[in-house]
Image (cartoon, coloured by chain):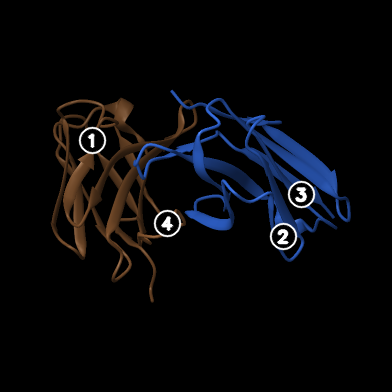
């Protein structure tokens, strides 16, 4: 059974800092991994999707990496801003034909001005 | 496109009452997902449909929960009778399958916050 863990559960940083969020998964047989952002009281917004054959994806100040063999992904946020404050979730789609995503519980990020 | 639409956004009901949550997926998407989010358990998949047919309902907690998708543009999640432990945020998501790829990005609605007293 696929399990996804995100560490730390919460992170507080000053504005301008570069930071890394971690995600690990127990079953390396995945199709892809997605990083989402969730603002309080809102739905999820997809940030980046990495296919199992890829090593990383970049979008603006965000960079996500994937090491499938070790069951790890990181989300790197450069030059953090207060507007980046949100909960970040990672989710994996396991091989086997299912469209099911298995989510971690998220990292709550606070960027202080 | 308006994105995935869910209604109501908030629902407060009393234990034992029937609750119906509604979802309109993104037009043209052929997969629809229902998730539940709680502090304790995080985000969990309840059920998903492909072309209006339920594919995996293994996440549905018990017989009190049922989901239907009568057509490509509408789905319901019903709880009858509701219990306080059903209080959570329920999300609907949709995706479009690319047959030659594994992309299948899921797009989420804003969620319905359910409180059962």
Marks 1 and 4: in contact by CB < 8 Å? no
Chain of the residue that carries numbered disc 3 in the rendered image: A
* Subunit of label 1: B
Q: Is residue B15 above or below residue A31?
A: above
On screen, residue A31 versus residue A14, left or right, reads left
Residue A63: x and y, percent? 73, 54
Chain A's shade in the image? blue
Residue in the image at 51% along x and 26% along y:
A3
Q: How many marks?
A: 4
Q: Nearer the viewer, residue B109 or A101?
A: A101
The residue positioned 76% from the left and 49% from the top of the image is: A76
Q: Which residue is mark 1?
A: B57
Residue occupied by mark 4 = B104
Which residue is tagged 2? A83
Question: On the same chain: label 4 and label 1?
Answer: yes
Question: Distance of mark 3 from mark 2, alpha carbons?
Answer: 15 Å
Residue B37, quarter of the rendered image: top left
**Chain identifier, colour brown:** B
Q: In the rendered image, which residue does mark 3 sit on?
A: A76
Q: Are marks 1 and 3 on the same chain?
A: no
Measured as percent of width and height from the top left, residue A20 is found at: 78, 43
């Amino acid at each position: 059974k696929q399990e996804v863990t995100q560490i730390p559960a919460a992170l507080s940083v000053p504005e301008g800092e570069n930071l890394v969020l971690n995600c690990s998964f127990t079953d390396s047989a995945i199709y892809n991994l997605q990083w989402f952002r969730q603002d309080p009281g809102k739905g999820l917004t997809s940030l980046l999707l990495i296919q199992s054959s890829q090593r990383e994806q970049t979008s603006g100040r965000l960079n996500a990496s994937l090491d499938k063999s070790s069951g790890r992904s990181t989300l790197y946020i450069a030059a953090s801003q207060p507007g980046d404050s949100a909960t970040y979730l990672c989710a994996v789609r396991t091989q086997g034909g299912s469209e099911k995503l298995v989510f971690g519980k998220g990292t709550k990020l606070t960027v202080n001005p | 496109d308006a994105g995935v639409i869910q209604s109501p956004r908030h629902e407060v009901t009393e234990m034992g009452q029937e609750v119906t949550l509604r979802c309109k997926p993104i037009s043209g998407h052929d997969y629809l997902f229902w998730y539940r989010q709680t502090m304790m358990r995080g985000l969990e998949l309840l059920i998903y449909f492909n072309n209006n047919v339920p594919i995996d309902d293994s996440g549905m907690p018990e017989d009190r929960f049922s989901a239907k998708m009568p057509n490509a543009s509408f789905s319901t999640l019903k709880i009858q009778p509701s219990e306080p432990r059903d209080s959570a945020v329920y999300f609907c998501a949709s995706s479009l399958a690319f047959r030659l790829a594994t992309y299948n990005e899921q797009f989420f609605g804003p969620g319905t916050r359910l409180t059962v007293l």
